[in-house]
Image (tube, rainbow, N blue to C red):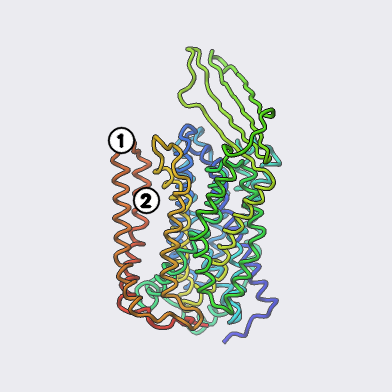
């Protein structure tokens, strides 16, 4: 066996792996952090909510292809090694991010703009699909047994720190060049900066050595020649892949993306909190919560992974609706006491050159006794014929007072605290489920389906659900309806994980209950697809349905059909008693 890595050596491994992974997450999350601005650059401005929805769909596309990247690069990692595989993913991610920053706008090249963005987002998704599994496996295979939770938890911080870095670079750039310049062209800078960050990471990673466990395996000629076949056609491995996905990762995915991305989207687009406050709220919450990834990763080495992860899921299920209702209450100006003497209305009229038409811009500013500020801006066109445009451009922004600002930071912190519980032990949990020879492939697929599909679709599906609750009587819709998606997914995952996952050497040995749960899951998969088809039919048969609606529903049904089939197979295995034994670590 390889001798243990020295303490100095393991920290070099963690640093080299974490820096590269952090930069890949930074590259991947810039797009989501700038979704509101990007929607105006790569889609017709008059589309409004449809443009934002399309941007979130492209953002989600990068998540959807992550499982394919997991399969492709996971196979490479189990055949040629961990080091060179996730060096390649880093180069692909950096190049595609840099190129997004160079794409001309919709006004310049029309429909080619969103198509090019989509292609590069797909490349980003493929690259990220190969990165995480490699980095987590690499660190875990250097870590001493009994400390994997602690050492791999440092890799777990990189996703959140990548989001932190992306928000920090965006805010710094915006403040340095001004809001107008940033909205016009400065949003490209965070994408272009990626080239420098990736170059630094490549230099660091080139100096890394291969994983000791993989090196020994290769030396003995025991590496897998077909890790895809071994992982997904052999029942003993496939059942663990399905258990990882449905019993842990799909719940972790929706908790992660609800607590961070959905929170930011909700605060900015639903609560209408201004650009800077909506992002600094997330930044402070991340800053305070990030150390808990390491805390819970380390605790999982002694207490076990299972109940820490499931505890985070349960808290999210119970707390999400009260937390988001509080966001709405804090930003609801109709319940606040206004300072009438401070209210101001300004109007500017500018003639459009070469015409007798005018642009009319009006700004209304209201101040409240809790230090909140409400700004309503409207840009309209007054035509020479004596008529205004049918649909003026309207923008609403709010800033909250200091007390409510820190309350919102605390509410986001609570959500990220749940994330640290679920995500901190996750890498060690996944690594220990599978043998070294197929570990990269086997752990990458459930991770990226859980995070890339279930998690990555949280902002998109959440907004889509809210859009479908809008009626003539209630044009705003139910602002909290989007939360039912992550709550439902996390609830199913919590029930499966509670029953089927082991905690160190202990598993709930209730064969009859597991058998009945298997029957329920066998029916649940087809029921989900039938429900989606029903709602798609209801939506697509109304006169106002569009091509966008058709594409969205085709994508959603296409994505969840194979997942529903996997749930059916998992239920079948549970019904036949394949999960009735104790699950020990796959390998040291």
> What residue do we see at 33% from left, 58% from top?
528
- The residue nearer to you, when weighing 309 against 471, is 471
> What residue do we see at 28% from left, 41% from top?
541
* Residue 195 visible in this rendered orientation of the protein: no
Please state the total of marks drawn on the protein image. 2
First reached walking from the N terminus: tag 1 or tag 2 = 1
**146 left or right, relative to 552:** right
- The residue nearer to you, when weighing 217 against 31, is 31
- Quarter that holds the N terminus: bottom right
* Residue 237, image x, y percentages: 40, 76
User: As displayed, is residue 225 above or below residue 421?
Assistant: below
User: As displayed, is residue 378 above or below residue 325?
Assistant: above
Badge nearest the viewer, 1 or 2 = 1
Where residue 412 sits, quadrant-wise, is bottom right
Q: Residues within 10 Å of mark 2 (few under 14, many from 20)?
A: some
* Residue 382, image x, y percentages: 52, 18
Where residue 243 sits, quadrant-wise, is bottom left
* Secondary structure type for disc 1: loop
Checking the image for residue 106, the label placed there is none
Mark pair 1, 2: CA separation: 21 Å
**489 left or right, relative to 171:** left
**62 left or right, relative to 288:** left
Q: Residues within 10 Å of mark 1 (few under 14, many from 20)?
A: few
> What residue do we see at 53% from left, 47% from top?
266
Where residue 178 sits, quadrant-wise, is top right
* Residue 562, image x, y percentages: 34, 61
Q: Mark 2 points at which residue?
A: 555
* Secondary structure type for disc 2: helix
Checking the image for residue 543, the label placed there is 1
């Amino acid at each position: 066996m390889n001798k243990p890595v020295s303490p100095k050596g393991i920290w070099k491994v963690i640093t080299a792996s974490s820096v590269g992974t952090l930069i890949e997450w930074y590259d991947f999350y810039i797009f989501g952090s700038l979704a509101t601005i990007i929607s105006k650059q790569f889609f017709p401005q008059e589309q409004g909510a449809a443009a934002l929805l399309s941007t979130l769909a492209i953002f989600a596309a990068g998540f959807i292809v992550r499982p394919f990247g997991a399969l492709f690069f996971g196979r490479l990692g189990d055949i040629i090694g961990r080091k060179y595989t996730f060096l390649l993913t880093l180069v692909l991610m950096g190049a595609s991010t840099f190129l997004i920053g160079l794409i001309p706008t919709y006004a310049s090249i029309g429909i080619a703009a969103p198509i090019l963005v989509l292609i590069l987002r797909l490349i980003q998704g493929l690259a990220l699909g190969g990165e995480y599994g490699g980095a987590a496996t690499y660190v875990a295979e250097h870590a001493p047994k009994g400390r994997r939770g602690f050492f791999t938890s440092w890799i777990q911080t990189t996703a959140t720190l990548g989001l932190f870095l992306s928000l920090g670079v965006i805010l710094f750039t915006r403040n340095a060049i001004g809001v107008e310049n940033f909205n016009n062209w400065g949003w490209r800078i965070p994408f272009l900066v990626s080239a420098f960050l990736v170059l630094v990471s490549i230099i660091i990673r080139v100096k890394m050595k291969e994983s000791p466990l993989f090196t020994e395996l290769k030396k003995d000629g025991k590496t897998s020649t077909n890790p895809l076949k071994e992982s997904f056609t052999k029942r003993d491995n496939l059942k663990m892949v399905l258990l990882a996905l449905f019993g842990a990762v799909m719940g972790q995915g929706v908790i992660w993306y609800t607590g961070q991305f959905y929170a930011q989207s909700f605060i900015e687009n639903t609560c209408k909190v201004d650009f800077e406050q909506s992002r600094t709220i997330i930044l402070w919450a991340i800053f305070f919560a990030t150390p808990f990834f390491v805390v819970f990763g380390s605790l999982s080495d002694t207490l076990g992974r299972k109940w820490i992860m499931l505890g985070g899921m349960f808290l999210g299920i119970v707390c999400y609706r009260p937390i988001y209702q509080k966001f709405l209450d804090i930003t609801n100006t109709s319940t606040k006491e206004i300072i009438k003497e401070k209210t101001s209305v300004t109007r500017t009229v500018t003639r459009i050159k070469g015409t007798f038409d005018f642009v009319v811009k009006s700004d209304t500013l209201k101040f409240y006794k809790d230090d909140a500020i409400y700004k309503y801006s409207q840009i309209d066109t007054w035509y020479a014929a004596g008529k205004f445009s049918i649909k003026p451009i309207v923008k609403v922004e709010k800033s909250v007072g200091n007390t409510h600002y820190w309350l919102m930071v605390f509410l986001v912190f609570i959500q990220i605290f749940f994330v640290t519980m679920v995500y901190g032990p996750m890498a060690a949990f996944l690594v220990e489920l599978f043998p070294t020879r197929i570990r990269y492939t086997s752990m990458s697929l459930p991770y990226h389906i859980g995070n890339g599909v279930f998690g990555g679709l949280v902002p998109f599906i959440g907004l889509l659900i809210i859009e479908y609750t809008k009626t003539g009587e209630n044009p705003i819709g139910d602002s909290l309806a989007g939360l039912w998606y992550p709550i439902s997914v996390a609830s199913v995952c919590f029930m499966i994980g509670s029953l089927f996952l082991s905690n160190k050497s202990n598993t709930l040995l209730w064969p009859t209950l597991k058998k009945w749960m298997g029957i329920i899951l066998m029916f649940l998969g087809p029921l989900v697809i039938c429900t989606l088809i029903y709602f798609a039919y209801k939506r697509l048969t109304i006169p106002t349905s569009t091509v966008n609606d058709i594409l969205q529903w085709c994508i959603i049904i296409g994505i969840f059909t194979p997942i529903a089939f996997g749930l059916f197979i998992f239920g079948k295995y549970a019904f036949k008693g394949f999960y009735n034994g104790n699950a020990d670590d796959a390998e040291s």
